Amino acid sequence: MPAGFPGATACAPYDGMLRRLIVEHKEHARYSLAEPLGRTLAVAVAEAIAPGRAVWLCPIPSAAATVRARGHEPLRRIAIVAARHLRADGYDVRLADALRLLRRPADQAGLSARERAVNLEGVFAVRSRWAETLTDQRVLLVDDVLTTGSTLTQAAGALETTGIAVFGAAVLAATRRRVVPGS
């Protein structure tokens, strides 16, 4: 598991079939894959939360230009499916689209952990309508792939600056830790 964000639960390594499914859904608009990916994310969420306690799932948002180019917001679609499955299993979960991007970060591919952190610094903000709703609530960040933890760290920081406590994160997959010069 990569260092950088404490308390992240991942379903599996980011390789093989899971990697192919995530990429197909995300980059090639294979909408039907939201169902199995959402069920998979629900497993990670269930491992991260205690039964019987209400939790808000907060997906990491994509840039508006990326959503337009892809024709959908893949992670949000997956999170909706995960929440539906969790509620059917008796979990009290709801979706909170609480984060927004202040600017579009550069592509993260090939960046070291340090470069990723700098790239994402100050990129997230809390949507004002969510600030009061989520204060004193349990919030779990959800994302598709955990690489260095920079995205989750920056997202949690944005929420926490408005008094919203993040108790952890659940992701579909995590990359295997690599030693990268400068990271």
Image (cartoon, grey):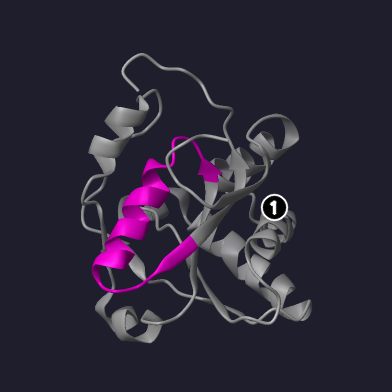
Rendered view: 92 above or below 114: below
Which residue position holds label 1? 33
Placement of 2 over or under 100, stated as above or below: above
Question: Left or right: 81 with respect to 7?
Answer: right
In depth, the one of 138 and 77 nearer the eye is 138
Rate crowding at label 1 as few (under 14), some (14 to 19) or many (20 or more) other CA atoms within 10 Å: some
In-front residue for pair 70/155: 155
Q: Residue furthest right?
A: 89
* Magenta span: 145-167
Q: Is residue 169 left or right of residue 114?
A: right
| For residue 6, above or below residue 181 | below
Tell me, yes or no, whether the highlighted magenta stretch contains residue 41: no
Q: Quadrant of residue 106?
A: top left
User: Residue 125 falls in which quadrant of the image?
Assistant: bottom left
* Towards the viewer: 77 or 130: 130
Judged from the image, the secondary structure of the residue bearing numbered disc 1 is helix
